Amino acid sequence: MTKSSKLRIIPLGGLGEVGKNMMAYEYGNDILIVDTGLMFPENDMLGIDYIIPDFEYLRDKKDHVRGIVITHGHEDHTGAIHHVLEMVNVPIYATPLTRGILEAKLARNGMAQKADLRTVQAGSSVQINSFKVEFFHVCHSIPDGVGLGIETPAGLIVHTGDYKFDHTPVDNWPSDYAKLAEFSRRGVLALLSDSTNAERPGWTPSERVIDGGFETVFSKAPGRIIIATFASLISRLQQAANAAVRHGRKMAVVGPSMVDNVKIATKLGYLDIPDNVLIPIDQALALKDHEVVLMCTGSQGEPSSILGRLSVGTNRQFDVKSGDTIVLSSHPIPGNEEIVYRTINRLFNRGANVIYEAIAPVHVSGHASQEEMKLLFHLTRPKFFIPIHGETRMLRQNAYLAEQVGIPKENIAVVENGQVIEFENGEMKLAERIPGGYVFVEGSDVSDMDPSVMREREVMSRDGVVMVKLTIDKRTNQLLQNPEIVTKGFKLGAASEALTIAARKRVTDTLAKANGSLQADLEQVVKNLVYSEIHRRPMILVAINKL
Amino acid sequence: MTKSSKLRIIPLGGLGEVGKNMMAYEYGNDILIVDTGLMFPENDMLGIDYIIPDFEYLRDKKDHVRGIVITHGHEDHTGAIHHVLEMVNVPIYATPLTRGILEAKLARNGMAQKADLRTVQAGSSVQINSFKVEFFHVCHSIPDGVGLGIETPAGLIVHTGDYKFDHTPVDNWPSDYAKLAEFSRRGVLALLSDSTNAERPGWTPSERVIDGGFETVFSKAPGRIIIATFASLISRLQQAANAAVRHGRKMAVVGPSMVDNVKIATKLGYLDIPDNVLIPIDQALALKDHEVVLMCTGSQGEPSSILGRLSVGTNRQFDVKSGDTIVLSSHPIPGNEEIVYRTINRLFNRGANVIYEAIAPVHVSGHASQEEMKLLFHLTRPKFFIPIHGETRMLRQNAYLAEQVGIPKENIAVVENGQVIEFENGEMKLAERIPGGYVFVEGSDVSDMDPSVMREREVMSRDGVVMVKLTIDKRTNQLLQNPEIVTKGFKLGAASEALTIAARKRVTDTLAKANGSLQADLEQVVKNLVYSEIHRRPMILVAINKL
């Protein structure tokens, strides 16, 4: 066991991207993991279900990992937990609601028994070997979120998680300004804070403004109200329930993830809906249209969600009908714009009136904007600053804000995943780079996806595939039949005959000259031929059959 | 020849979508086409290069088509011109710059000689059989745009094309308010107007605000300035040139489409850059960094554009270097957000400072916002209103604005492509539906794409393809060798051996029982087997080889 006075920060995810947030703090032989998130694939990551951080760095040091702290219950901070637990089964620290969400998630992956979950409260602290972690409450688009003060022998680190400074949150629990100021009095070595909205000027509106948006919707809606939002956005469910109470409507929740979250949040006291207001969906569907509000998922246009199915008329329990008012209480996650807007268009075409962020105040962000970020700098007064959670452009913008409030440029490190940062004797320096890329998950398995495989999918998605079956005399190397050509992903149509004739000639020529790799030669010949005949570059598969 | 007093409006493109704008007006035996646009594919339209309107309706009536009017030079209004001309070669009417752009476009498609292009001027009119078309100037993000007053025996139609009410346009040529008011005095039967920004409150800022944005950029930039924008955004080129003059920089234009447009616009007097300011790129690269500004394309992150290549380090003439200031003077076209932001991130990572719409006023929209749309209603006072150019949600919102200013709901028709609208005796009614869908173009050819082919591409893009080669004794129907399995788009890895063994067994069983379609039976067996062994649903290709 070597002893070192260095604190090492190892960014495993969330820096240079939106999603899969994961950070490791390393001091001597102690490692603390903060968050274990996933991210959803971009549009050109064909066939990928989700992406988790590359945490191979920890594998060699897995005996040093002392604990995992989860800041809040969103998938981009929790979603890789079962993958991480497969490597290191250490205690997981989380606030009550976050713990409830983790339990449900681990149960779905058959790991409920195995995990060592420990409840912590905002305002409390826990010593995890070299790290004393103090949890402070932050407002976000899910209740019970915390930021972390991490007291290490090298100094105090403040790590925000996702946050906003909402002065009038729906649960009346503002972010813990006092704790942030206290950190500042003790002296903050480094601040690591959320950069998601660093491009957005001003101050993110309070969740409370949604009340006004909902009030307008509820006042005008002639029939059913269907509100789609994130299953984890508990405060939005509370606000919809409050509006339902005010307007004498009953509320039903549809879809397993939202039903689960309502149960957990109600049980733990984060959601308070009168018993006679929350009713099962079948009862709600039996009421008059103007007496109900239905809450569901699908605000990102996911085809398998309730709203996705409603938009194409394949929902099992009920359909959209004329007179329905559908509210998308959400913002499209970057990359989802096309599918979200397509869903909205389809719902309009089915006769609903659709209300969404662009035309009414039915959503606000859960992340701090520029003025809140500047406040955070002033509250914590860190010596060093490392922007986290965001694409490079957002990290840069957060760094620019830090400079504006007086943090020297040389004390700011804009880095991406895998760039290790070291603190020693009150100084910061960039250390080595470790792998920090994508680990793709298809189905439930980590996939062996490599760039060549992704390129093959890309080729086939664009230009399809051609299988050519050649029957050859094994002694004379002569073609015995016309080549059989099968295509998928495009049609040959009229070109079919010409291609078959040309293929016969070119293959015959190639066979006459063939030496060495017949398979590779024939694939190349077919490839060139297909391009010259039909100007496509499909994937080529040649099946040689020697008689 | 039948005689009718009906005016028929046939929306062939642009209603229910953003792009491929095309409309036909039909009166008796006369048809007038307005615009012939293309649209770019959505992210899930795999392999498609672009989409044109389905104008099959016109084929049977092609002898009735009397002319084509093009409102302005953007691709979403011009891009299908050569496809339309292949069917009906009639006179094309356009203002000088639009004509110049059409000529260049037709020349690229080898149709320059064939087309009958006729220059019109804003403010003038032309009689095209039953239609007297009056061209009125509108501001937009390309010079020389016009809207149309179409006087027909059934009444006067106002068709805006794309427009904004810019009071201080860069070319000092505001939209023609007087003509719109004159139409109103004559009585407008129906207004058809651009809905693109119908969700946006207020008034679109003037192009002139870009001067301030550029001034800030030019004042601060320590080295080269590289500005990416649309090749057709001539006023932006003018503004960049003006800033270059003010700050003593030389300007070079990079990329064939932008170079072409600068030539056309300069020749026709729409662009005025001093001779000693506009220099060739090789001269610009020889100057000191703070002496140059480079204009290029690629503001949508297109991989083959200059900016796309700069972001990945594959540009031929020059690379991004530290100290460069790169400006994206543009807005991501919906669906392009991911690739645009990826390009920005990559440029940051290459050491450039990147300035873009989200963080500085370096772009404004070319389309009217809500208050301008309301002004248009008041200027033209139409009896009927048909919102055009936009997804359903935008058309609905434009209709909602029309109601707000007093147009009766029953006089507004929110329809999608293919819904024919008829006017007779001053009344509007919906007539039949005709095909109004997508015609896909791959390469330069209209493709025979059908939904089954697109589904095949989707399957392969997600799950890849498996080719299984089976060698069978043609008399005994017995498998003579182990099945050969080739995969593309995924790897079998460790599952390879198990799958081969299982395939051998299942194929043998199937062969024993086979009657009828051996090929189909074997494909089904392999499909089921692959799913049960590796939980994938790839495209299955079975090559049977009977010895």
Image (cartoon, coloured by chain):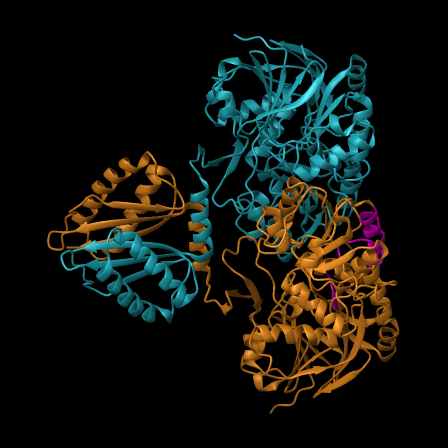
Chain colours: A cyan, B orange
Q: Is residue B157 left or right of residue B45?
A: right
Image coords of residue B76 (percent x, y): 65, 66
Image coords of residue B111 (percent x, y): 57, 79
Q: Quadrant of the C terminus of chain A?
A: bottom left
Q: Residue at x 64, y 84 (%)?
A: B116
Name the foreground residue: A511 vs A91: A511
Is residue B205 part of the magenta span, yes or no? yes
Q: Is residue B174 above or below residue A163?
A: below
Q: Residue at x 52, y 15 (%)?
A: A90
Residue B95 lies in quadrant: bottom right
Is residue A466 part of the magenta span, yes or no? no
Name the foreground residue: B266 vs B491: B266
Q: Is residue B437 above or below residue B325?
A: below
- List the single residue furthest toward the bottom: B1
Q: Is residue B257 visible?
A: yes
Q: Is residue B204 visible?
A: no
Image coords of residue A460 (percent x, y): 43, 53
Residue B192 lies in quadrant: bottom right
Name the foreground residue: B95 vs B408: B95
Q: Is residue A306 above or below residue B172?
A: above
Q: Residue at x 60, y 79 (%)?
A: B112
- List the single residue furthest toward the left: B475
The residues colored magenta run B193-219
Image coords of residue B159 (percent x, y): 75, 73
Q: Is residue A222 left or right of residue A15?
A: right
